[in-house]
Image: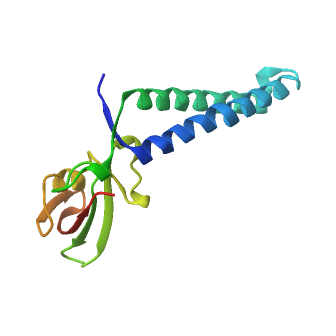
Amino acid sequence: MEKLPLTRAGQKMLDAELKKLKSEERPAIIRAISEAREHGDLSENAEYHAAREKQSFVEGRIKELESILARADIIDPTRLSGSVKFGATVTVVDEDTDEERTFQIVGEPEADLEKGLLNLKSPLARALIGKDEGDSIEVRTPGGARNYEILSIRYV
């Protein structure tokens, strides 16, 4: 079984989602199914079918989260230093537009680009790994090549 790297914060986030699904979502769906059954004929009962569909989604997500957490390899970025590696918070500047962006390199299950959490397997993260402050990198994207300079590397 392949280990999945996760930060402690990522583990807590996924664990909280799992607990919410089990303690709130699952019981609410069971109640909704029960109420929909009371309405009679299930073959034409839209509420029943919607509740069953939601139940299927929630149960699938619970299984997925349990699998991720069982395979998690928790890495504490505060114990790391040096060049860019998993857990690093990296500030880069786009050499073409002078736009600065800050990302933390995290595992795939916790990645969220809008929150600055960059998937370890993304082209940008792969290009950053092993580099140091002041290094320039080229990243090939579907929109063409982009050049970035690493301004800072922090492990928080």
Name the outermost residue toward the right.
Answer: 39
- Quadrant occupied by the N terminus: top left
**In the depicted structure, whether residue 99 falls above or below residue 44:** below
Estimate the x, y position of residue 92 in percent, counting from the top left: 24, 68
Estimate the x, y position of residue 48 in percent, counting from the top left: 76, 28
Estimate the x, y position of residue 64 in percent, counting from the top left: 47, 30
Describe residue 23's horizontal placement relative to residue 108 as left or right: right
The residue shown at (32%, 60%) is 103
Of 47 and 81, which appears nearest the observer?
81
Q: Quadrant of residue 8?
A: top left
Q: Quadrant of residue 152?
A: bottom left
The residue shown at (68%, 30%) is 26
Describe residue 18's horizontal placement relative to residue 148 as left or right: right
Name the outermost residue toward the front.
Answer: 79
**In the depicted structure, whether residue 109 falls above or below residue 65:** below
The residue shown at (29%, 74%) is 100
